[in-house]
Image: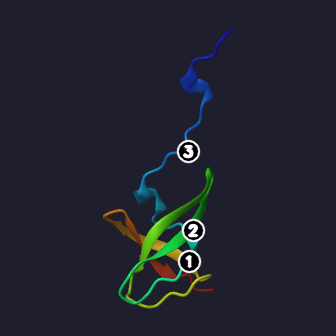
Amino acid sequence: MIRPAERTESSTGFSVQDLIGKHGEVWIGIPVDGFGEVLITMAGGNTNHIAASMDGNLIPEGTRVIVRNVKDQIIYVEILEG
């Protein structure tokens, strides 16, 4: 017996809007007036995204952050306190 594909396959696809509220780590430092890169771990694996600081602050490499907004495929992050 062959099962229909929609019952046996799972999707790892997601919308960039799904990243709001997710935690990540700055992979490439985010300058005050520019962009860096953030690594976010999700159920399907790791994803890298172009990121900017939500409040315009420098965010160094290795800093834990939370995604607060997404605009034009760019995630806007804040430093994760604690």
In the rendered structure, the answer to whether residue 62 lies left or right of residue 50 reads: right
Q: Amino acid at mark 2?
A: Leu
Q: Residues within 10 Å of mark 2 (few under 14, many from 20)?
A: many
Residue at 59 percent across and 25 percent down: it is 7
In x, y percent, where is residue 73? Answer: 36, 62
In x, y percent, where is residue 20? Answer: 45, 65
In the rendered structure, the answer to whether residue 51 lies left or right of residue 5 reads: left
Q: CA distance from mark 1 to mark 2?
A: 6 Å
Q: Amino acid at mark 1?
A: Val
Nearer the N terminus, badge 1 or badge 2?
1
Residue designated by label 1:
26
Nearer the N terminus, badge 2 or badge 3?
3
Residue designated by label 2:
39
Residue 4, numbered label: none
Q: Quadrant of the N terminus?
A: top right
Residue designated by label 3:
12
| Res. 25 image quadrant | bottom right
Task: Give SS at disc 3.
Answer: loop
CB contact under 8 Å: marks 1 and 2: yes
Q: Is 70 placed above or below 35 here?
A: above
